[in-house]
């Protein structure tokens, strides 16, 4: 079975160790995720790589204190699209906070030129604690991990007016894995059709393997990061 690497443990624009593993033949292809797409512009990206450019519109808020300016990231996204096309460069809005003003996300989606993926904010207990520490008030928009389905669907349906949207790991919503049949088609690799069963609601294929070894927040220091401090 083929192996498709992914960079979920950190930022592929800040940690380039994935490239060494790819060049060494440890995986057959790679899907890299970054909030810093401009860092990739000076690299010759191999043909067997798909790039997820994460641009949430939250870079000007306490949620993402160290993320690049939105305009800089969008400019890098457009350049990567020119170089590699809309199948290999994915606009990723992750996370979406469904109570936020919709214009934040719709403004990002106006720049889409190919595939788009979204996921909604997961409120881990340690993220709630960070929120209190940062803002001086508890997070009160919803209880538990996930926002109510009706709110997530309401925002998602507005976003879908711009075109097809791939959804990542959301309860109650049809989802597409970060390593999917579509990705295997782009790579020209035959899929086993088996699922990895990495976590609930995740339909990633069994070909998926992690390329980064981080177990701590990256330098972007996003308040919602699933890694604990």
Image (tube, rainbow, N blue to C red):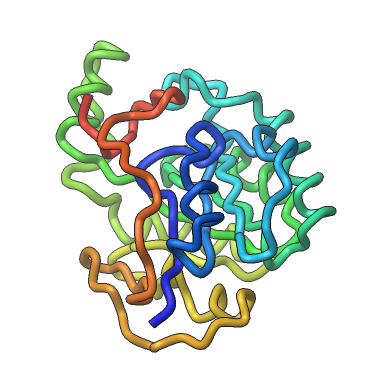
Q: Position of residue 112 (x, y in %)?
A: 72, 54
Q: Quadrant of the C terminus?
A: top left
Q: Position of residue 97 (x, y in %)?
A: 42, 42
Residue at image x 40%, y 39%?
10
Image: 153 above or below 14: below
Comparing 129 with 207, the one in front is 207
Comparing 58 with 80, the one in front is 80
Comparing 66 with 84, the one in front is 84
Residue at image x 73%, y 47%?
44
Residue at image x 82%, y 54%?
83
Left or right, residue 45 beside residue 142: right
Comparing 52 with 173, the one in front is 52
Image: 178 above or below 56: below
- Residue 46 falls in which quadrant of the image? bottom right
Image: 56 above or below 126: below
Q: Position of residue 62 (x, y in %)?
A: 43, 19
Residue at image x 51%, y 69%?
28
Q: Quadrant of the N terminus?
A: bottom left
- Residue 102 falls in which quadrant of the image? top right
């Amino acid at each position: 079975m083929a192996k498709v690497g992914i960079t979920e443990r950190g930022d592929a624009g800040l940690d380039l160790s994935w490239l060494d593993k790819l060049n060494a033949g440890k995986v057959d292809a790679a899907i890299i995720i970054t909030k810093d797409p401009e860092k990739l512009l000076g690299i010759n990206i191999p043909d067997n790589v798909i790039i997820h450019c994460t641009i949430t519109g939250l870079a000007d808020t306490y949620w993402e204190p160290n993320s690049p300016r939105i305009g800089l990231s969008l400019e890098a996204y457009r350049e990567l699209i020119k170089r590699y096309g809309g199948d290999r460069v994915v606009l990723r809005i992750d996370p979406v906070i469904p109570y936020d003003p919709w214009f934040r996300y719709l403004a990002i989606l106006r720049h889409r030129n190919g595939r788009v993926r979204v996921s909604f904010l997961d409120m881990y207990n340690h993220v709630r604690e960070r929120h209190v520490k940062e803002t001086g008030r508890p997070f009160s928009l919803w209880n538990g991990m996930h926002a109510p389905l009706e709110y997530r669907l309401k925002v998602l349906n507005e976003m879908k007016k711009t075109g097809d949207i791939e959804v990542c790991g959301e309860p109650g919503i049809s989802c597409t894995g970060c390593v999917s049949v579509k990705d295997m088609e782009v790579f020209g690799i035959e899929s086993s059709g088996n699922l990895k069963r990495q976590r609930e609601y995740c339909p990633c294929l069994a070909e998926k393997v992690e390329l980064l070894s981080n177990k701590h927040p990256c330098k972007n220091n996003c308040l919602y990061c699933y890694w604990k401090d």
